[in-house]
Amino acid sequence: MSLFKKISPRSLLQWVRTNQDFLIINLVLVLKVVFFSLSVGMGVGTFGMVMASAAVLLTLSCGFTCLPFRARTLLLLLFDAVVSVVLLADLLFFRFFHSVISIPVLFEAGQVEGVSSSVVNLFQKWDFLLFIDLVILLPYFIRLVRLQPQPASRVGKRLVQVAAILVICVLSLSVTSRTMAANFGKNAYIGLNWNNTVLENMGILNFHLFDLYNYWKESHANQSLEKDKPALEEWMQKHRQQGPNRFYGLAKGKNLIIVQMEALQGFVAGSSINGQEITPNLNKLMKSSMSFDNYFTQIGEGNTSDAEFMGLNSLYPAPNGSVYIMRSGNAYQSLPWVMKNYGFAGAYVFHGNTPQFWNRDKMYPQEGFDKFYNLQDGLKLDDKLGMGLSDESFFRQVASNLTQFKQPFLAFTITLSAHYPYVLPQDKQGLNIPKGQYSEMFVNYLQSQHYADQALGEFVAALKAQGLLDNSVLVVYGDHFGTGWTNQDIQKFLGLNQPLNDYTSHELNKVPLLIHLPGGKGAGVNHVTGGQIDFYPTMVNLFGLDKKNLFYFGRDLLNESDGFAAFRVYAPDGSFATNGVFYLASKDGIFGHGAAYDRKTGQKADLKLVKEGYKEARWQVNMSDLILDTNGLPQLIPKMH
């Protein structure tokens, strides 16, 4: 009781005056957390989020109050600056990836230099508010230090004050976290990259603390494939029995040339603007190809590298970060290895950027490529555009190199010119789009896709002239959806009567897939639902390869009736689509909080229709994670390359 007797309005007022720098900084930072929440579309958040954010800020900074006034004021300003930089980084990352930065993503910081123009375009005019307080507070605190220096109090007294703050903050965080666990269950604290429960109920700073704890826990966990190996082997044995093997071996003995187009989203193919075809060459190629109009992108935070990884390995992307960076030391049974095991003379990969970007120089040998043609080895930067080599020059150099390879070969090419922010010089803009018809970003996107299509057309013409088109399977697909424009642009472009919602937005996350065989064999539109993870088994069937020693999660699209595409990161784990239904999981991880949609009508459907699909989607992505985390393929496939 003696402690409480010493607390009086006068003593509290004195403490506030003595610690006004500490209180002002933390109040401003709480407001910044609220600003972040508003900026990413989560609203002001709950009162619990505000209190939890204040608690963690006070916990991290209260130790400064034990220092001399001048030193602590300087450190508090530094603390303000550091937290502000973290919030800005999260804000920019969220605008691009629709999630905040997780620990694994920090390992990819080296990629920022390569996409600096993309980062610059993510800034918005109100972002300066995150730092304006530093400009205002710095002279105020300097004046405070000079004119009102505070007498040093006893160390013991200061420590007691810090301890009291810590106790209050820990109790506050404990109550908030327990309440959240009671409402949402243990799933609230896992899969934080897609599960927004912590973010919405405890704030961005607590998100980072839980993410750090989860990362530490997982990195020290003794994971093993042994327990799940029998179930995986049994599942794969049944999975290989997919039939009836239509088109089996139709491409045997042919070359395989893969073109992965940057940001080529499905709605662009076959579309026109002001009477002008956006992708005339792709449209022409589509008429003589097997084409798939329900082919979803399934990327995670690895974006383009994830599209490559799924297509070449039929495994899911990592829940955080990029497999190319985090698991580049694993053993894989990638498509290049498989093709070479069945008679291909070599496998080659082309990309008009530096070899270090997305860690490709380390990952490609693991995937079985014999040579990587890039700006430091094999490709000449004679026409720079955006992040690297222009698509025109890139395809010209690729075509020249292909004539030197012993056949049959696998050539994997990744384009670059249509990368965000899609800025082209005036002489490469081939579409006539009046200013103001759409946002500048959307117009730039359409122009970049039109230019990329022009370069693709020149590449196809070169293959034909060289005689390669008649002896090759040419595959063209988009790596992922575009970004940076508004839903109003898409709504207007597609002529939709209703604004896009969560479901219709995900429906648009499809990319074109074209498989062109010599003579146009098998040409036609296939409406089966699939995704990038299905590319591998589809090629295995088409080239007549033996499946008995392969492991893959995808399905052969040429022999699939209903289809199945599971998603992660951009849609919460457990989300999936079939021909008939689309289940969009809830971001709190609770099945009943998700929504099912009938894909024909767009209306909500009974959740009973999607329960088994939800379980299958969760199981597949979890097992894929386990295989990657334990480098488990050699245990599942005794005879690898």
Image (cartoon, grey):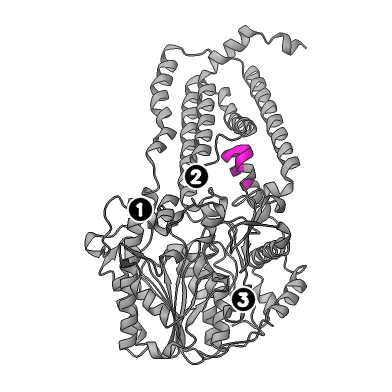
Marker disc for residue 180:
none
**Does dot 2 land on a helix, a strand or a loop?**
helix
Residue that mark 2 sits on = 90
Q: How packed is label 1: few (under 14 Cα within 10 Å), some, or many (20 or more)?
A: some
Q: Is residue 3 shown above or below 377?
A: above
Give residue 394's position: percent from left, percent from top.
32, 73
Residue 481 visible in the current orientation: yes
Magenta residues?
199-212
Residue at the far top: name it.
10
Q: Disc 3 marks which amino acid?
A: Arg
**Does dot 1 land on a helix, a strand or a loop?**
helix
Q: Nearer the viewer, residue 537 or 10?
A: 537
Q: Is residue 408 left or right of residue 55?
A: left
Residue that mark 1 sits on = 441
Q: Disc 2 marks which amino acid?
A: Asp
Residue that mark 3 sits on = 555
Residue 152 visible in the current orientation: no
Query: Which label's residue is closer to the chain start, 3 or 1?
Result: 1
Does the magenta segment cover residue 210?
yes
Task: Identify the residue shown where x is 33% and y is 57%.
Answer: 444
